[in-house]
């Protein structure tokens, strides 16, 4: 069987998550994290206008944002969903664990993806 190394086009996958943060490229990031094509941004864990600002600022480079809400999943506030959709960004709500796995898969497919991840 031939094995090919996966290329992430300059973006780094999530190595691991929990408790209370994320490991990316061997570095530990304490707390909740936003990953966009332009970089990494910490946030307080509240998925609100402030948390989505880095995603909206890079809307031209993002097709879909994965919102990992921890272990409890709830609908995104209607005005936030409307702002993302108006910017042409699809929204997927899921647990943080699922969002981390899905983010990595979408990176391997060279998709334009961002993630808003509440630390667990």
Image (cartoon, rainbow, N blue to C red):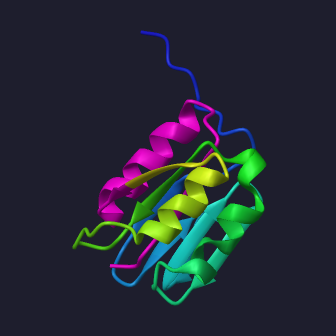
Taking the image as shown, residue 3 lies to the left or right of residue 99, namely: right
| Front-most of residues 41 and 88 | 88
Q: Is residue 79 above or below residue 46?
A: above
Q: Residue at x 41, y 56 (%)?
A: 100
Q: Residue at x 35, y 71 (%)?
A: 69
Q: Image quarter for residue 76?
A: bottom left
Q: Residue at x 63, y 33 (%)?
A: 110
Which residues are drawn in magenta? 93-120
Q: Image quarter for residue 38?
A: bottom right
The percent coordinates of residue 53 (x first, y second) are 68, 73
The percent coordinates of residue 101 (x first, y second) are 38, 50
Q: Is residue 12 visible?
A: no
Q: Is residue 39 above or below residue 47?
A: above
Taking the image as shown, residue 88 lies to the left or right of residue 16, namely: right
| Front-most of residues 105 and 73 | 73
Q: Residue at x 64, y 41 (%)?
A: 112
Please state the total of marks drawn on the protein image: 0
- Any magenta on residue 7? no
- Any magenta on residue 102? yes
Taking the image as shown, residue 11 lies to the left or right of residue 27, namely: right
Q: Quadrant of the C terminus?
A: bottom left
In the image as oriented, which residue stretches furthest toward the top?
1
Q: Is residue 51 visible?
A: yes
In the image as oriented, which residue stretches furthest toward the bottom?
44
| Front-most of residues 28 and 104 | 104
Q: Is residue 39 above or below residue 5?
A: below
Q: Quadrant of the N terminus?
A: top left
The percent coordinates of residue 115 (x first, y second) are 53, 60
């Amino acid at each position: 069987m031939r094995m090919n190394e996966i290329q992430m086009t300059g973006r780094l996958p999530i190595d691991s998550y929990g408790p209370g943060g994320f490991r990316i490229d061997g570095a530990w990031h304490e707390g909740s994290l936003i990953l966009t094509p332009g970089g990494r941004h910490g946030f307080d864990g509240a998925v609100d206008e402030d948390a989505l600002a880095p995603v909206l600022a890079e809307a031209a480079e993002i097709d879909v944002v994965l919102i990992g809400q921890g272990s409890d999943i709830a609908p995104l506030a209607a005005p936030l969903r409307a702002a993302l959709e108006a910017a042409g960004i699809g929204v997927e709500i899921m647990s943080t664990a699922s969002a981390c796995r899905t983010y990595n898969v979408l990176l391997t497919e060279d998709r334009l993806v961002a993630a808003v991840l509440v630390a667990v």
